[in-house]
Amino acid sequence: MEALRAAAALLLLLGGSVCARAAPPAEAWGYVDVRQGAHMFWWLYYAGGSEGSFKQLPLVMWLQGGPGGSSCGFGNFEEIGPLDRDLKPRNTTWVQAASVLFVDNPVGTGFSYTDSNEAFTRDVAMVAADMMVLLSNFFSSKTEFQGIPFYIFSESYGGKMAAAIAVELTKAVSQGKVKCNFAGVALGDSWISPLDSVLTWGPYLYSTSLLDDTGLGEVSKAATAVEQAVKEGNFIRATELWSETETVIEQNTNGVNFYNILTQASNDKARSVAGTGHLGKACAACPSTALLRHRHVRPLHQQSLSQLMNGPIRKKLGIIPQNVTWGGQADEVFDSMKGDFMKPVVDIVDQLLAAEINVTVYNGQLDLIVDTIGKSHDFLYLSTCGCLTTGQEQWVKKLKWAGLPKFNLLKWSPLKDPASPERTGAFYKSYKNFAFYWILRAGHMIPSDQGSMALKMLRMVTQQK
């Protein structure tokens, strides 16, 4: 009965057709055919409330990870949207500080869908090309946003896609193909340099007392095998070995939570990974890539979230084709991208910085996937620069950006936690068009773990007080 009341409340609060709303509408949504047989879904919330009208605030596009995780579902109802998955108002929603555009990307993710397997994307270049079609369509139809500062925020594999999208968007804007005021990109716990993350897993877990000497040796050996496959250019094999390395970690840590090392996986998430719900498939002898999907795509499709999206939300939206199930093609999305999964995009970030695009990197202290400790056992104590080196920082130190030497010399500044002003919530430093935020007491999904701090960071990145 409570669930029915909540669903009814949502329909009353947000219901009605898009075209019937008074201008400016509170929200809008739709599909864009980005290629033949490839249909991408988007959902926009206009900024409002005490912060002022949407015209005084930026527009932020949020990209989820996976690949195969739904921005319109997980990012919206689990992280930064106006309502949580229980349909209760979220105090730390980003709609307070920006209009937010969620896109189910790549095609096949969330409510986005393809008509055939041939239409799935295979790499970030295809992902970026599809997004240019969507953004061209969006800004042409929503002309009120053309002059508003536009930022891309991302999480996990979404950061890898965001970097590639930002490069293509910069070109498209200069060529007049997309009319928007592109202001910057923010890469959250992002899969920019996969190998740098994998090689730091063992030292990170060892330094936090989650591995003993034997476990460190086993994890390091498995990670070295991944490194060898990458060096050989065998990226599909590298993805499979990535999964096997995670299995070694699970065996040696009694099943550490990859998203937040101090948090146990919820029962809901465990059921999802175990194979219940619409994504569930027997997995007693899954191949490596199937295990990856179970660990990193299906937790973004928790059973309760799936029921919400395929129930009241589907009814509310009113445009989802009858044959489309939210998240129904997520596994296929991941499988199609597995040859791209372990490829680095550090060079793409360099292109952005060279083009003077504002780039922000932010990372959770307790994240394991994109972790925050040194590359080798020796780095547990001291790196060559005289300080601890984090997993994310390792690829940053590989940048060819001319401002990097001065950035590295800067001392970070503390930020108070808005939820508890007596304690530090993060550290950050910035130089010219590059900034780095270390978010404390947060894992892979920073807005879920530290919503107030994430909102404060958003305001800072988008140059709000």
Image (cartoon, rainbow, N blue to C red):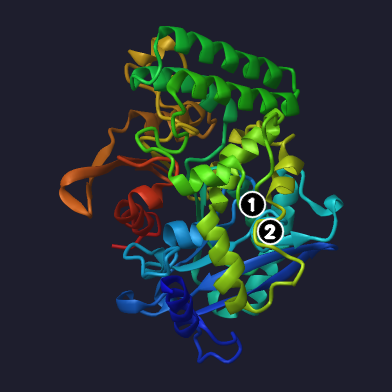
Viewer-proximal residue among 135 and 298 = 298
* Cβ atoms under marks 2 and 1 closer than 8 Å: yes
Image vertical order of residue 249 relative to residue 435, above or below: above
Image vertical order of residue 345 relative to residue 415, above or below: above
Quadrant of the drawing holding the C terminus: bottom left
x 74%, y 41%: residue: 335
Q: Amino acid at mark 1?
A: Ile
Q: Which mark is residue 24?
A: none
198 left or right of 91? Answer: right
Distance from the alpha carbon under mark 2 to that under mark 1? 7 Å
Q: What residue sits right under mark 1 in the picture?
A: 165
Q: Position of residue 268 (x, y in %)?
A: 48, 49
174 left or right of 11? Answer: right
Q: Position of residue 287 (x, y in %)?
A: 72, 29
Q: Amino acid at mark 2?
A: Met
Q: Position of residue 355 (x, y in %)?
A: 57, 47
